[in-house]
Image: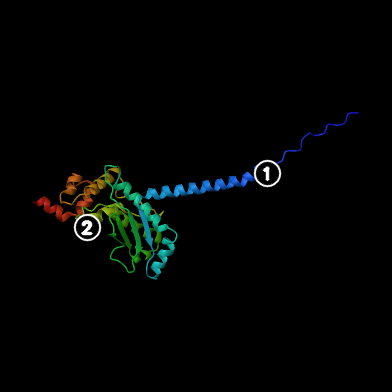
Amino acid sequence: MDEPLLPTSAPKTASPASTASYPSFLRRLRIFLVLAACALWANYEASKGFDITVLPGTSRSPAALRFGLLFVSNGRAARLVLSSSDLVQRVLYPDDSFPRKPVRRITLFLADENLKETVVVSHGRRPGEFVVQMSPAVMEATDLQISVASALQRGVARVWLWDGRGQAPRSLLDAMVECLTTRNNAGATLSTTSCCAAADQLRLARVNRAMKEEWNDRMLEDVCGSPSEKVCSVFLTSYRPQYDHKQAS
């Protein structure tokens, strides 16, 4: 009688080599994810085009402590500066024919005492560096997100505006900042409303481009053409004494 056939080979089992390769795969995956994260962060930093430094208030006042806790420690202030800068640049520099103001660093900090304005902008120690000083009064608002966001956009707008090599009228610059700045109470995000139309934004960008050169009293008329145009009329109104004097002469 024939005996039953016996199996000629043992069941297959995972080889030690394949088992050992699994941790190696995880290590390679982790390295890949770390490198990808680093690349994304590098792209994010490069997209800013400038450095952002946010300093907590030097005093121990409630406003300084609140600012440090709610806007500095979590990076919210830096993100507001970045988003405001992106918005302002898209209006002032719509294409390569509008020379971009060289901004290399924006330093933000909360002043120790209340200022006459919500935000004050000054030049830093080196070319392309700007200091945005925010008044502690901003931190007394009921909606801090909107209050701080509005103040920061005003400061950032002033940073990116050319100033006629320091000769442009303050009233004109303030009018342009007003045109660039508004608040959205629903989402606490910032947008442009008074300059929302594409044609109006282009006129605003042209005025800013003209102010790259040394300021002169004919600049607005040369850029705007007719003073009755919407955006330019805002600027001419703020600069009315000089404009009326020029027309009379």
Disc 2/disc 1 C-alpha distance (Å): 77 Å
- Mark 2 or 1: in front is 1
Residue farthest along the front direction in this orientation: 17
The residue singled out by tag 1 in the image is 16
Q: Quadrant of residue 174?
A: bottom left
Tag 1 secondary structure = helix
- Numbered label attached to residue 134: none
What residue lies at 44% left-to-right and 50% top-to-bottom?
Answer: 41
Residue 220 is situated, as x and y percent measured from the top left of the image, at 19, 48
Which quadrant would the N terminus be assigned to in this image?
top right
Q: Quadrant of residue 225?
A: top left
Label 2: few (<14), some or many (≥20) within 10 Å?
Answer: few
Q: Amino acid at mark 2?
A: Arg
Residue farthest along the right direction in this orientation: 1
- Residue 192 visible from this viewpoint: no
Q: How many marks?
A: 2
What residue lies at 23% left-to-right and 51% top-to-bottom?
Answer: 234
Residue 156 is situated, as x and y percent measured from the top left of the image, at 32, 55
Residue 221 is situated, as x and y percent measured from the top left of the image, at 17, 47
Tag 2 secondary structure = helix
Direction from residue 21 to residue 60 in the image, left or right: left
Q: How is the image coloured?
A: rainbow
- Numbered label attached to residue 170: 2
Residue 208 is situated, as x and y percent measured from the top left of the image, at 24, 49
Q: Amino acid at mark 1?
A: Pro
- Residue 218 visible from this viewpoint: yes
Q: Mark 2 touching mark 1, by CB under 8 A?
A: no
What residue lies at 38% left-to-right and 52% top-to-bottom?
Answer: 83
Direction from residue 84 to residue 239 in the image, left or right: left
